[in-house]
Image: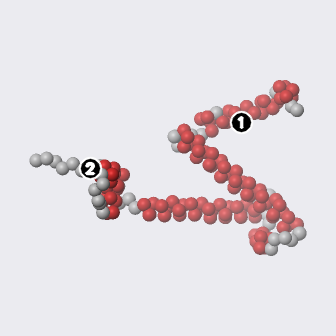
């Protein structure tokens, strides 16, 4: 008796044999090793995590504007956001100092996270750090260069 061999998912999908969507899904699930893998639930979880992260960024940005170096009542900040164009001191503090500083903090944090993700991807190492490529050593050597007599000679 000859044992029936089961074709691989790739050869079955590329063989030109017509298969129903259910059979294709079963072959793909068998290939990845999961019988109950539901991609829609997986992607919904990813989108939920992204949405929660965005909401947390907005909340912490607002808290930064309220509680940074000088406390300003949240009602005053909301009033200034809803009625721009005034010349009072609170409007100047909120729009010229607190909001730009908070936005720069968000941009810098996102940039550091993006740089870390790129470094981990390029090195194919989830534990990659700035010490791996010598970035920290280069940043630490910069003050030595600035304090050296050579820097004084090369200044324009």
Reading the image, the residue beneath label 2 is: 7
Along the viewing direction, whichever of 91 and 153 lies nearer the viewer = 153
Q: Residue at x 64, y 33 (%)?
A: 134
Asked if residue 35 shows in the view, the reply is no
Marks 2/1 in contact by CB < 8 Å: the verdict is: no
Which corner quadrant holds the C terminus? top right
Q: For numbered disc 2, what is the local secondary structure?
A: loop
Nearest to the observer: residue 120 or residue 25: 25
Give how far apart the Cα atoms at labels 2 and 1 are: 55 Å
Few, some or many C-alpha atoms within 10 Å of disc 2 (few <14, some 14-19, many ≥20)? few
Image coords of residue 28 (percent x, y): 35, 55
Would you call the spot at circle 1 few (<14 residues within 10 Å), some (14-19), or many (20 or more)?
few
Count of labels shown?
A: 2
Q: Residue at x 85, y 28 (%)?
A: 154
Could you say which is closer to the camera, residue 47 or residue 3? 3
Judge whether 75 appears above or below 59 on screen: below
Residue 100 at x, y = what percent? 78, 58
Describe residue 116's horizontal placement relative to residue 21 as left or right. right
Residue 35 position within the rendered picture, expressed as x and y whole percent measured from the top left: 33, 58
- Give me the residue at 59% from left, 35% from top: 132
* Secondary structure type for disc 1: helix
Looking at this rendering, what residue extends furthest in the left direction? 1
Name the quadrant containing residue 120.
Answer: top right
User: Does 51 sit above or below residue 33?
Assistant: below
Residue corresponding to mark 1: 139
In the rendered view, would you say 120 is above or below 18? Answer: above
- Say whether disc 2 or disc 1 marks the residue closer to the N-terminus: 2
- Residue 137, given in percent of the width and then of the height, sits at 68, 33
Residue 64 visible to the viewer? yes
Residue found 51% across the figure and 60% down from its top: 46
Query: How is colour applied across the structure in the image?
Result: secondary structure
């Amino acid at each position: 008796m000859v044992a029936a061999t089961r074709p691989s998912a790739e050869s079955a999908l590329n063989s030109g044999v017509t298969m129903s969507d259910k059979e294709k899904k079963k072959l793909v699930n068998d290939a990845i090793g999961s019988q109950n893998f539901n991609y829609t639930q997986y992607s919904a979880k990813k989108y939920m995590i992204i949405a929660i992260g965005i909401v947390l960024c907005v909340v912490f940005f607002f808290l930064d504007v309220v509680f940074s170096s000088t406390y300003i009542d949240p009602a005053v900040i909301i009033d200034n956001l809803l009625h721009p164009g005034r010349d009072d001191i609170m409007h100047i503090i909120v729009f010229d100092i607190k909001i730009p500083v908070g936005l720069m903090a968000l941009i810098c944090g996102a940039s550091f996270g993006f740089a870390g993700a790129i470094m981990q991807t390029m090195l194919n190492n989830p534990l990659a750090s700035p010490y791996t490529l010598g970035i920290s050593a280069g940043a630490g050597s910069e003050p030595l260069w600035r304090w050296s007599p050579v820097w004084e000679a090369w200044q324009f």
